Structure formats: structure tokens, C-alpha cells
Image (cartoon, helix red, strand yellow):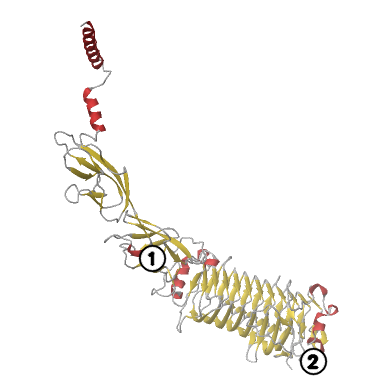
Amino acid sequence: MKKINIITRLFFAAIALAMIFTTCGFFGDIDTLREEAIAANGGGGGGDLAFEGPTLTKTYGDLPFIHTVSKIGKGSGAISYSSSDTSVAEVESDGENAGQVTIKKAGNTTITATKAGDGTIEQAEASYYLIVEKKSISLTVGPTGHTLVPFEPSPVAGNYRKSTTFNVNVASSGLVGSDKVTVTISGYGLSLANNSGITNNTKVVTLNYDGTTTVAQTTAFDVALGISGNDNYTLSGTNNVSVTIKDGQAEARAIPLSGINFAAFNIYVRNALNKHYILTENYSLGVGYNNWTPIGSNLEWERFTGTFNGNGFTISDINVPRSSSYTGFFGYVDVGGTVKNLSVSGSVWTNVEEAFFGGIAGHNAGTIQNCNFQGEVSANWCNVGGVVGTNYGTVDGCYSNVTVRGHFGIGGVVGQNLGIVKNCYSTGTISGISWSIGGVVGDNYGKVQNCYFIASVTDSVKGNYFIGGVVGFNENGGIVENCYSAGSGSISSTGTGSLDNSSVGGVVGCNEVGGVIRNCYSAIATVSARFWVGGIAGDNYGTVVNCVALNKSIVRSSGTETLIGRIVGYNSSAGASISSCYGRSDMTLPTGTLTGHNGTSVTSSNWYNTSWWTSAGNWNSSYAWSFGTSGNAIWQNATSSRLPILRNMPASATQNPTVAL
């Protein structure tokens, strides 16, 4: 009995202690403990309501799928489904397809299953995180059709254009349903047109070049394409379009020119005078009057400073009648400008008093190289040349087959030279009604080197005075070296004034104080004037050294003047010099007493013998003749029937100079 009482007392004491602990919060809130218990049993009575895995990854375009709870828990409440972002994916809430998910776009959403409470078991929920990734697609790109250049031809045609097209579609039917994308491009000054609405079917897209952006690539290169307009897709693999762009901003990226875009080029170049161009085919400007506008003028901001490479092709039928100076295929080539490997034929002319006319360029301060002009160049004033009117730069490897007419400063290659003219030749008729008329250069202040003039029986150099087979007037500081004139034609004066009909020479008409003529010969058949006429120079106030006159005859056209000689007609006593010069022994001279300089006599055993030309004892050793077949040698050996000829001449040069019998 006593033992039972003790047990009873301990029981009530325990209850009291528990009430105290509960009141003081040692066991926590009773409702909270209940909720934790419920949660441990499946969330509100559903019991074990759960999906398999917390995350599911799909791809845009995947078919609808069902992903239901893998544990349905306890209780009899219905299970329904929902999506936190129905723009990404929709889910069937209930019914036969309850839990079926339909993907709408790429993105993320939470799919939740909710089991309703049933009065005994409370509501329960379970979720998974759905990731819808972008669909990976690739493009099928067709080839581009054209090389892109900074200007369009008119009409738009040909291979060189500012725009081109290519075919594009999404490969392997990669787009979903009626989806479309826009193809994009960036960089290199490129843009696209007709590039939206791209589907699984092929579409033609236009690719444009802005014409100003620098593009350093010199050959075809790939540019990556992108897509926009539909965030459900991403590109994979290689999605490039291959393009060729010639921006003209370097010679290696010269703008190609053809017959299709040549007229447009003549307009475009006026605002792109510093760019580089290359001709890709022969082109005729067409038979017609005034069919070309010269490139560049004497205005400082209108001078050509780029490169024009004729590439061995010909521009034919040029017809440029001008009432202004600086006229030719180019009007003005400035320092840094280059025109090369170009042939032009036609007519450059004026009927008014204008200057600086040339077949290739009216004025050159840059480089004219390996160019030629065939036709007519004519002006009623000065500085008219078959290739260049006035030269301050370099004219190298050029030739002309022309009729050149003007007043003064008239030359077969260059009218007036203040630079360098080398490795050039001319044929044809060069005439002026005044002075400084030359087979190669009319008026020379610079250097004329390694040049020749050939006159057939119908060709000639003629004018009033200062008329020369190579140079008309060699001014103070001018140098004429390693040059010759030959052929069955003539060098003559036609003037009638007191000083006219004078100063005519087989090489130079008048050699001024400070002028130099060296290592030259003349074998042109006839040199004719009233006085001051010679096989090398008509009159000399400078230096003539190592020269040979092999003309058939020196003719006194009228009167009884005595200033005629095989070498020089008149040699000034005021510092002029003639040394190591030779004249043909059987040259025909006017009868009577002559006071000109004749030089030492030579015969065919000399002039057709290379050893005579190369023998050091025959010449002023300071200016030895340079013979050889390679390297820097200037002259090629004479033969038994041919005089020495110049090396390193234009490929078209046919040299066969002989002594007229």
C-alpha cells in the first residue's frame, strides 16, 4: 500500500513537471510539433508526395511529355499540376493528360503538383524545376557571286560590285513549326538586306559593303553569320559566308576595273584619288567625241595620289577634246601617285591655247612606269608629250607611237622634263611651230637616260628651232646620256625668221650652259637646218663627251651659213667643251668652208665592232660605255650589221639601228 502511494505521487509529480516545461517553452509549440510531424509524413497528410529528381532539362522543340509525381502520398485528395511561367511551358492541370507539359519557349519554370486535402489529410505539394534550353541550329550558306568594291557599276552588273547575294536556309529543317529567324553579320563594313524571315527553305540574301571600311584581307575570307529575332535558337557549328573585298586602300587590295564598271569608276575616282585600282581586261571607250574625263587636275585637292595598274591591258578609243590644261587619261598625277603597265590609244587634243597635254598624263609628279600611248596628242600651246605633258617625277619604261603637235616643249614621250625619263622610246612624227621639239623630250631640265627615237622614212622631228632627235633643248643642269636616234627619217627645222631654221641636232638641238650630253650616238639619216646644225648637237654651250655621229648627211637647208659640223654646228668659246667624239668619215656635208666641230673620223670597221665601243683608250674614262648582257649593263653589243642597242627597254622595243647608206 505504501509502495502504490509512492508510485502515484511520482506520476503526478511528472505530470506537473511536464506542464511546467511546456509552459516555459522547453518542448516548443504543440501546433508546430504537429506540423513537423505532418510534413515528415508527406506534407499535410498526402504522405510521400514527390517527383523523381528536383530538376528536369528539355530543349525547345521537344514534344510534349508527362512527368507526374512518383509518390502520391496518403489520402484521397485529387492531384493537379501548374506551371509558374506558362510562357515557357504549359502543363495539363488534371484530367486524362494531367501532368503533360507542352514547351512554349526557351526559359525556366517550376512545375508543381498539388494534392488536395480530404478532411483527414491536409493539402500537400511537390515541385520540380524545368529548364528549357535553346535549340541548336546551323545555317546552310551558298556561295557569294561577286567581289565587293566601294562603288556600284551602272547599270548594276558584272563581277565587281558594292553588293552581292548568297543563298541561306536553316539546315536539316531545324526550325520548329513556322518559326523564322533573322540572319545577321557584323564587321568589315558589311550589312545584310532581305535577311529576315529565314526558314527551313532557301532564301536569297543581299550582302552590302559600305565602301569605306578598311578590310586588310587580300583574298577571300570567311565572315561569321549570326541570328536574331527568335530567342529560342542558338547557332552551332560553322556558319560563315565567304567574301572577297577590295577596298582600294592598299595596292594589294586594288579595286578591280572591267568594262562593266569602268564608266562608274570615272565618276567614283574623283572622290577617291588616293585609292588603288587595277584593270582586269581590255576596254574600249567607244567611238565618240569627248568620251573621257581626265582623272585629277592641278587643284591641290584634285590630284591623283593612288595607284592605277593597267595590268598589261589597253584602254582604246579615248577621245579627249579639252578647253583646259592638264589633259590626258590622267590630268594630274601627284607625288606618291603611280600609273603603270597601261596602254592607251586614241586622241587627246585641243584647239585652244592650253598646256600640259599627254597621252597618259598631262602632268606627272609621281611615277609613270611601263606605259604607252598610240595615236595623237595635240595642243595649241606648250608642254605636250606622247606619254606625259610635263614631268617632275619619273617616267620609266614608256613608249609612244604617235603624232604629237604643239607650239614649244613638244616631245615624243615627254613635253617638258624636270625629273627623270629613262628606258623610254618613241616613233612617229613630232612637230611644233616654235622651239624645244625632241624625239623623246622637248625641253629638258632633268635627266634623260637610256632612251631612243626611231624615225621611219615618213617619220620626223621638226619645228622652228631647238630641234633634236632625242631632246630639243637641254637646259642648264640637264643631262642626256646613253641615248640614240636612228632610222631613215629626218630631224629638221622649217622656220623662216632670222633665228629660225637653226639649232638642230641628231641627239640634242641646243645644249645650254651646264647641260651635258654623253655616251650618245645618232644614226638618223638626215639632220637639216639653215645653220647651227650637227650630228650630235646643233649648238653647244655645255659639255659633249663620248658621242658618235653616224648620220648619212648634214644638210644646209638654205643660205651659205658655215656653222655646220659632224658633231656640233656651233661650239661656244665661253666654257663649252667637246671631247672623245667621233664622226662618220663619209658623212655628206654642205660644200664650202664649214666651221663646226667634226670629231675624229670613223668607218664601219669601228661602229659595227663592239671592241671599238668598249676600248677604254677611245673614250673619256670618266664616262666609259657600259656593255654587257646582265646586271646593270646599259648597252648590248654591236654586231656586224647593227649598232649597239639599249638593254632593259620595254618588251615591245624592236631595236635594229643601222647606218644609212
Residue 251 x, y percent position in the rendering: 55, 67
Tell which residue pokes out farthest to the front in this image.
1
Q: Which residue is mark 1?
A: 140
The residue at 74%/85% (across/down) is 535
Mark toward the start of the polypeptide (2 vs 1): 1
Q: Nearer the viewer, residue 374 or 252?
A: 252
Residue 406 x, y percent position in the rendering: 58, 81
Query: Quadrant of the image for the N terminus?
Result: top left
Query: Few, some or many C-alpha atoms within 10 Å of disc 2 (few <14, some 14-19, many ≥20)?
Result: some
Q: Decide if residue 408 is on the left or right side of residue 163.
A: right
Q: Nearer the viewer, residue 398 or 181?
A: 181
Q: Is residue 269 above or below residue 559?
A: above
Tell which residue pokes out farthest to the left in this image.
119
Q: Would you say residue 170 is visible in this rendering?
A: no
Q: CA distance from mark 2 to mark 1?
A: 84 Å
Tell which residue pokes out farthest to the bottom in this image.
661
Tag 2: residue type? Asp
Q: Which residue is mark 2?
A: 586
Q: Quadrant of residue 192?
A: bottom left
